[in-house]
Amino acid sequence: MRYALFRGCFLPVRLPHIEKVSREVLEELDVRLQDVEGFSCCPEPVGFYSNDRLTGTALAARNICLAEEEGHDIITLCNGCTYTLKQVNESLKANPDLRTKVNEILAETDHQFKGTIDVKHFATVLRDDLGFDKVAMKVVAPLTGLKVASHTGCHIVSPPEIMRFDDPFDPVVLDGMVRVLGAEAVDYDLKTLCCGWTLTNYGDKGAANELLGEKLVSMRGAGADCIATICPQCFYQFDTGQALASRKLGLDFRFPSLFYLQLLALAMGHSLDDIGYRRHRVRDPGFESKVKEVVA
Amino acid sequence: MDYLSEDESISMKEASEICLKCGTCCVVRAHFCHVQYDEQFDAKNTYVYNCLGSDEPAENPNIWMCVSCHKCEEICPYEVSPIRFIEAMKSRALELGIAHPMILGEVENILSTGYAFPLTRSSKRQREQLGLDPLVEGAAEDILSIAEKTGLRKKLQRSKEEGA
C-alpha cells in the first residue's frame, strides 16, 4: 500500500513536529509514503482556490499529474488540501471539456491530467483502505479512560457528494476513530461549529476568541480531557488560538489539542515526547498524568 | 464545480433575491455560520444576508470571512447558494484588482515559492532539529506558466496598479 504523500504547506512550515509523527505512524501501519518532487501548494481553498477557480484548478491538476506520473494515489494530511485536490480530481475526471481546457493550460509544463488516481485524506485511508480493524491491531497501549472531544472540521465533509467522508451536520467518523484507540469520544454542543480560522485571519479577532471560548467550554463541559483534530489549521486554532483566546477571555483551564495521528502514536506505544507534545502551546499537567497512567 | 461566467453570476444574483431571510443558515445554533460571531451580525442582519445585499465586491467587505464550508448551501430550504455568490464576489474582486491584501499576499507567495505560507527561519530551524528534509522553494517555472495562461498575473498587476 503505497501513496504519494501530499503534505501541503501548513504542516511542514508551521507544524513540522506533526509532519514527523505522521510519517512515522503511517509507516508503522504499513502505509508506505512516496515523497514527490515538485508538489506546490494544493492551492489553499480560502486564500487562493475560491478567488481564482481556473488557476486553482490548473495548479491542483499539476500536483495530481505529478502523483499520476509516480503511479500512486495521493494521501493528504490536511482537510484543505483534500478539499481542493479532490474537487479538482473529480471534476476533471467527470468533465472532458474542462479537462481539455486545463490540459491546454498545462501544455508548457509537460504534464497532462489523465485521471488515473484518487485523492484520499489519511482518515479515509485508515477507514477504507487499511480498515479500522487493522489500525486496532496496532494499538498496544489502549487510551482507556481518556475522554476526547472530536473536531472533524469543515473542508473534509463538504461538499458531501464529492468528499464522501461524513455527515456535515452530524459527523461520527472521527468519534469512531477515537474509539478504535480505546478512548472515549464525548458528545458536545457546537460539534459542527468551524474552528474560526477565517475570523482570526480576515475578520474580528475578538469574535474568533469568543467562538473558540464557547466551543472549548462546551467540550470541557462534556468532560473531555483533550481535543482530536484531523486538520492542521483546526489544530493550530485549538492550540495557538486557544493560548491567545484564553488570555483575552480569562479561561481557567488549559485544554490540549492533538492531531489524530499523535493520539494514534500514543496508542501505539509512543510517549508524549515522541509525538512532539512539548512543542504545543497548550499543555496541561492533568492531561499528561492521565496519558502516562493509561499508556503505562 | 462551476466557473461563473457573467451570465451565471447574474443568475446567482437572482438566486440571492429569493433568500427569505429565514435565518436557518446563520441563526439556528445546531449548524450556524461561524462568522455570525462577529458582533456586526445578529438575527435580523445575518452574515449571509449581509453578503447577499450587494453584488459589488467593493461594497461587500465581509465576503473575505467566508470559509467555504458549504453549510449555508446544504441547509438552505430554498436552494439559495450563498457560497457561490460569495465566491463569485471574491473572484470578481481579484479581477478588479481589489482583493483582500492577505489574499494577494498568499497568491504572491504561492507564485514565488510554491508555498502559501512564508518559509521562516523558525520553521527551517525546527525542521533541522527534527531531522526533516529542508523545504525547497520551487516549481516556479510551471506555476508562472500556468498563472500567465490563466490571466492571473495580469490580475495581480492590476492589483498593484490599484494599490499604487
Image (tube, grey):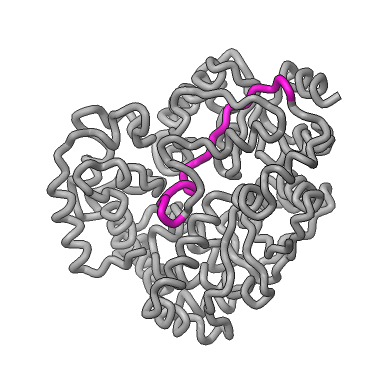
In the picture, which quadrant includes the C terminus of chain A? Answer: top right
**Residue at x 56%, y 43% (from the top left corner):** A233
Relative to residue A176, is residue A32 drawn left or right? right
- B72 is within the stretch colored magenta: no
**Could one spot residue A168 in this view of the protein?**
yes
Residue that extends furthest to the right in the rendered view of this protein: A296
Span shown in magenta:
A144-162
Farthest residue toward the top?
Answer: A252
- Residue B150 location (% of width, % of height): 41, 76
Q: Is residue A25 left or right of residue A67?
A: right
Could one spot residue B126 in this view of the protein?
no
**Magenta includes A147?**
yes
| Relative height, residue A264 to residue A91 (above, below) | above
Instruction: Tell me which residue sits at (29%, 64%) in the image.
Output: B96
Judging depth in this view, the residue of A23 and B135 nearest the camera is A23
Q: Measured along the vertical axis of the image, is residue A175 above or below residue B134?
A: above
Residue A68, horizontal then vertical, whole percent: 62, 74
Q: How many marks?
A: 0
The residue at 81%/19% (across/down) is A293
**Residue B108 as seen in the image, left or right of residue B7:** right
A246 vs A138, nearest the viewer? A138
